[in-house]
Image (cartoon, rainbow, N blue to C red):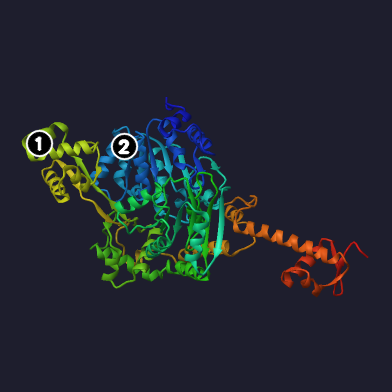
Amino acid sequence: MDIMLPHLEVLKQYWSHDSFRPMQEEIIMSVLNNRDTLALLPTGGGKSVCFQIPAIMKEGICVVVTPLIALMKDQVENLRKKGIKALAVYSGMTSGEIDAAFDNAIYGNYKFLYLSPERLRSDIFRVRLEKMNVSYLVVDEAHCISEWGYDFRPDYLLIRDVMEITGPIPVIALTATATPKVAADIVEKLGFRESNIIKSSFSRENLAYIVRYCEDKNGQLLRVIRGVRGSGIVYVRERKRAEEVALFLKAQGLSADSYHAGYSTDLRSRKQDDWKNGITDIIVSTNAFGMGIDKPDVRFVCHFDLPESLEAYFQEAGRAGRDGVKSYAVQLWNNNDVKRLKQIVNISFPEIEYIKDVYQKLYKFFDYTYGTGKGDAQRFNLVEFSLKYKLHAGSVYYAIKYMESEGYLELTEELDNPSRVMFIVNRDELYMVQLKNESLDSFIKSLLRIYTGLFSEFVSIDEEYIARVLRNSKAAVTSMLMRLSRMGIMSYIPGARSPLLIFNEERLEEKGIYLPESRYNAKKDMHMGRAESVITYVSQDSSCRSQYLLDYFGEDSSPECGECDICIENRRSDGRSKEIERQILEALSNGPVEVSGFTSFISAENKVIISSIRDMCDRGILKIEGDTVKLASKR
């Protein structure tokens, strides 16, 4: 019998909750009934529980495809803390690590195997997959499979190949940002047996969307923070700006810090923990921050620069107010931001010939000849490459990203992999080594005390922490690990920090690189269209902000929120209009008044007074005869 525990009991046992969030239970029941399911939940809606609970309840291993390595690692770590066996395979791991992980997935009674999408290309994975008892296939960030989505990744299209190997198992697709067009495309691309889309409203009643036009952004940001108070995130586009804005806030006596991918893993972890634990109130960050962070009491999210799409904005803004308490999503902008956003779209699409030239130079950089390189992953230093070939680093980056969208290459996020170790002898053999090598005995015992699982999988270690425990130097610890590795007792992989460039195809001659101009232009137009949607969102002053966003995501009958800057301004305008109307009627109580004479009675601009008079005439309250205004009821 497949189902072992009721879903509520699993929720209580592993998450210590008595009830589900909105829509979670409906999604879980759909999955448990073996239906292909597309779940659309807003940021913070608890998407992972929707597949984790069914997978725990069913025999076999759940394969999860997700593009975000940092988030993947966090989810695996969180599952392990709950006593649930989970592992991850992604670029940057050695062949030995990958082999051990797949062995565990087949024979180790694991419940979850997380995969980065490029691993789907691997023949080794496909061969091993045939031996796995797969319960469910989960497609996280499912919008990545759609060319209409804002973050299309060609490797996601390989999921259909995986489905042919696993046979007819339920597919669970999840996303927080999908327009109706993208949702329909996801269902088609994943070959759902029936269209089954479960959508929670993206409405956030406790979140007020505020847009402020300002030239002095630092000053406006300061007013926002002092007006809202509490924990917050400030998103900026560039690393340098993150540091500058954080320094400015600190100089104003505020508890603030910066965060971006340029900091080391340890430093990022400390900064993140300080913010999560309330030691730091405000984190100023690039979009490297926020994914997978569960902090419910974020009172505001402020975008210092314009985002590239409403999908990205909505996801980031949604990190505010997850506890249901009134919170704010604030967007700052000015005309320079509009120009800059359009420039970014244009810069993001270098000329096709330039892209082809970068393609050839990348293969040449790693000494690949024509017909070689397919499937290889190389640590890549963008600056070093750009300097060698006298190219602009930004243009090179966008050329690579375009080739990535066409499936030729892939540039991973900057990986900060810690050192990993695994004993490659059994316990009895290790014991004999300890007896024969007294100098190694205490070191091995310490490793076994500090870390578990060293005989079954590669385990991340911290040489500095080991050194502190042993009261020794990091160099001495590293030397000891290297010695064990040379003796064939342990596999030791020193930590490294850099992105990986993955070559999905063998090196092609220029005529073999297919980058059609029509598709290039269509992609550029689509990106510019998303940028224009952002510009319209901030510049329009007539529609409720929440209504505008919900309409973008296919909810076209939502009520006005009453809390955004436009709703508040409309309320104020209504109040001012009523007061002006009252003063007009008071002025007319003693008889007709010339149009130009109202300024003597009413402290408002003449055009505002005239607008009110015309409106009152339209409603039959007043009438105009020549230059004179009188009450319609009096003859």
Question: Residue 593's image quarter?
Answer: bottom right
Sequence-wise, the earlier of marks 1 and 2 is 2
Task: Answer with left or right where residue 517 lies relative to residue 575.
Answer: left
Determine whether 629 is above or below 205 in the image: below
Extreme left residue here?
436
Question: How many discs mark residues in the rendered view?
Answer: 2
Residue at figure coordinates x 42%, y 27% from the top left? 2
| Front tag of 1 and 2 | 1
Residue type at mark 2 is: Ala
Q: Residue 363 or 483: which is nearer the viewer?
A: 483
Dot 2 lies on which element?
A: helix
Residue on which the image places disc 2: 105
Residue 83: x and y in percent read 34, 33
Residue 89: x and y in percent read 31, 45
Check the picture and name the quadrant holding the C terminus: bottom right
Question: Residue 241's image quarter?
Answer: bottom left
Residue on which the image places disc 1: 433
| Mark 1 crowd level (few <14, some 14–19, many ≥20, 10 Å Cα) | some
- Could you tell me if residue 148 is visible in this image? no
